[in-house]
Image (cartoon, grey):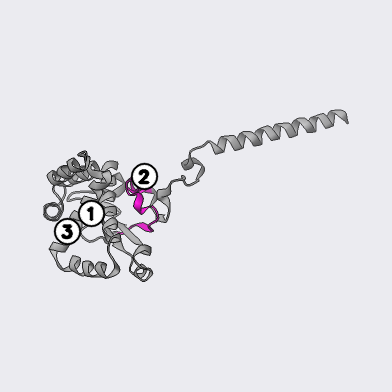
Amino acid sequence: MRFKAVSVIVVLLLLAVVFIYAIVYFSSKPAELTGAKPLNVFYQHKTIPKVVEPEVVKALSFYPELKDTPIDFVFDPNTSKSIMLSQPVLKSFFRGQKNRTYIIKINPRFVMVHRSMPIENVPQDILTGWFGHELGHVMDYSQRSNWKMLVFGVGYLCSDRFLMQAERNADTYAVDHGLGTYILATKNFILNNGDLPLAYKARIKRLYLSPQQIMDLIKKVKKPI
């Protein structure tokens, strides 16, 4: 009987050791291995596809003002002429300017003249710059009242002048928030890519800030007051 009692105690002690070890082991594992979401404020109120999550979160980290802003990042092959497209969610207009929500549509494939590839295969810094630009749009939109957004939306659809101003505002917001090198890398990636349609590159040159203008903005941001 005494031997059995000792055996039971030994077994219980071994189980306790295994249990404690398991707790320590799994609590020290990285979040991506345990399935837990990292404790990062930039995940709040956001829907982010897993395959572009690192680049989205990195871009979001430059915009602390947007940490409480609901934004859905969604794949959508119907993004017209753009790789990405940012819009306010129409039904959220009824909640007022401060409670507006936004959607950033992402073409799941980066399409070129002779080939295409999944968007997540685009170099990380380039994707970060792309998301940084789109978040610049969100910053721009968030500063406008509902009425001003409606007027702006009509102008955006009907006038190249409004469209140009919107794209340049987004670039400027991104550079002002510290994303200048990423925006510049994205711009050069597009303009120097020999396999992108000439019409697309011409549109980028016409509507967006040039690489030189981006560099000038970067210098102003870095210039001490």
Q: Nearer the viewer, mark 2 or mark 3?
A: 3
Residue bounds of the magenta highlight? 51-76
For marks 1 and 2, give the CA distance. 21 Å
Judge from the rendering whether residue 127 lies leftward or rightward of residue 18; answer left or right. Answer: left
Judge from the rendering whether residue 4 lies leftward or rightward of residue 33; answer left or right. Answer: right
Q: Residue at x 70, y 35 (%)?
A: 15
Tell me the number on the disc at residue 165.
Answer: 3
Q: Quadrant of residue 13?
A: top right
Residue type at mark 1: give it. Ala
Kindly state the secondary structure of the residue where label 3 is placed.
Answer: helix
Tell me the number on the disc at residue 170.
Answer: 1
How many C-alpha atoms fall within 10 Å of the one at disc 1: few (<14), some, or many (≥20)? many
Q: Position of residue 30 (x, y in %)?
A: 48, 38
**The stretch drawn in magenta includes residue 209:** no
Q: Residue at x 30, y 60 (%)?
A: 142
Give the quarter of the figure containing the N terminus. Answer: top right
Residue type at mark 3: give it. Gln
For marks 1 and 3, give the CA distance. 9 Å
Kindly state the secondary structure of the residue where label 1 is placed.
Answer: helix
Kindly state the secondary structure of the residue where label 2 is placed.
Answer: helix
